[in-house]
Image (tube, grey):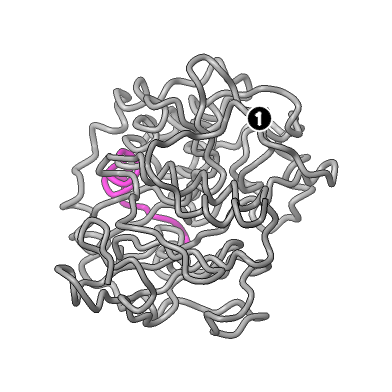
Amino acid sequence: MQYANTWPLSESGYELEAPIGYGSFGTVYAAAALEGPNAGEKVAIKVIELENYPDSNIEEIRKEIQIMRLSSHQNVLSYHVCFLSGRQLWMVMPLLEGGSVGNLLKHRYQEGIKDQVLLASILREVLEGIYYFHQNNQIHRDIKAGNILVSRSGQILLGDFGVAAKLRQGMSARTFAGSPCWMAPEVVESGGNVAYTNKVDIWSFGITAIELAKGRPPYAGHPAMKVMLMIISNDPPSLDEDEEFDASFKEMINLCLQKEPELRPTAESLLRKKFFNKAKGVEYIRTHMCADLPRLETLVKLPKDRKVDRDQSLGNMSSGSGGWDFSLSTGENPLSGKKQNDDPLEQIGSDEEDPLDSLLEEEN
């Protein structure tokens, strides 16, 4: 058996247990390592079926892997190891048994989180992760509750980098990507043709703050096309004046949700806002949100049009209501119906061996 950083490098080194999440690229399973120094340790394994993906999609997966590989921050999800098993890619990650905050909203906070100390504590941890991204010239581009993962100890991590872009210093992104309700106006308007900056994450962060406070983002339930048009034509979303939230919370959201990107604050300056003085950190999150969570797999619902079978093709699987929401953008512009190609400047380099290299060489 081969190992990388003490983790097995083959399918036989792990036992898959219950599925805990679904996404457009694959299924996430709870699992256990069977061999080596970490035998018996619980992990999450994202199994990605590569058979139905053209090279362009494989490049998107490569980006996700490389961003996770290069990330080193307490609020950003990393992975233990990844390897090819036939035509599947296995990504072995820490198991965060609290699932996603999006999942907790669905099952525990349908009307939103009203404890403003808890809100501030969660959002500050998320913002620290965003700040790390921006310091490293990265854009996440899909900040939302479903991509915020939580451990039973209360640790908050940003996950799902399938649409994240690595930016060279001073450059901007052009790709049309993200989840409709959380998209910044400049992303919708650009259709992949106008450059935008990491301020798109600040807009998405403001939408996520509303999502956590109310249980759902603005425009939820509308078709994607209508959401896009509303983002462009309507005034920025906000909390109603009569809603019982602190003025500093409303101010922070309003600062984030400005249609002109240059008027939005940076992640660094947002961290200094008065609202985050309320934050009490992971211990408060653990005692007030995570102490009595049920087993994650009991909260996961299989998408209606899918059965649990890890050997089936996963290429068209849509995001379900499971614990780890790995819903990834396809890169399609709903306003034009056309695919957008990534700017070459966004390609990520790494000196480490990439498990997808051999696959791409075979197909070339």
Percent position (x, y) of residue 182?
59, 43
Q: For residue 317, which quarter of the picture?
A: bottom right
Q: Which residues are magenta?
A: 110-124
Nearer to the camera, 343 or 333 = 343
Q: Is residue 31 above or below residue 252?
A: below
Describe the element under mark 1 as helix, strand or loop: loop
Q: Does residue 165 sit above or below 112 in this rendering? A: above
User: Visible in this render: residue 110?
Assistant: no
The answer to whether residue 197 is above or below residue 357 is: above
Residue 66 visible in the current orientation: yes
Please check the rendered image and state whether residue 123 is part of the magenta-colored stretch, yes or no: yes
Identify the residue shown where x is 73% and y is 32%. 192
Residue under label 1, please give it. 343
| Quadrant housing residue 123 | top left
Say what amino acid the circle numbered 1 marks. Answer: Asp
Judged left or right of residue 91, residue 356 is right
Residue 269's image quarter? top left
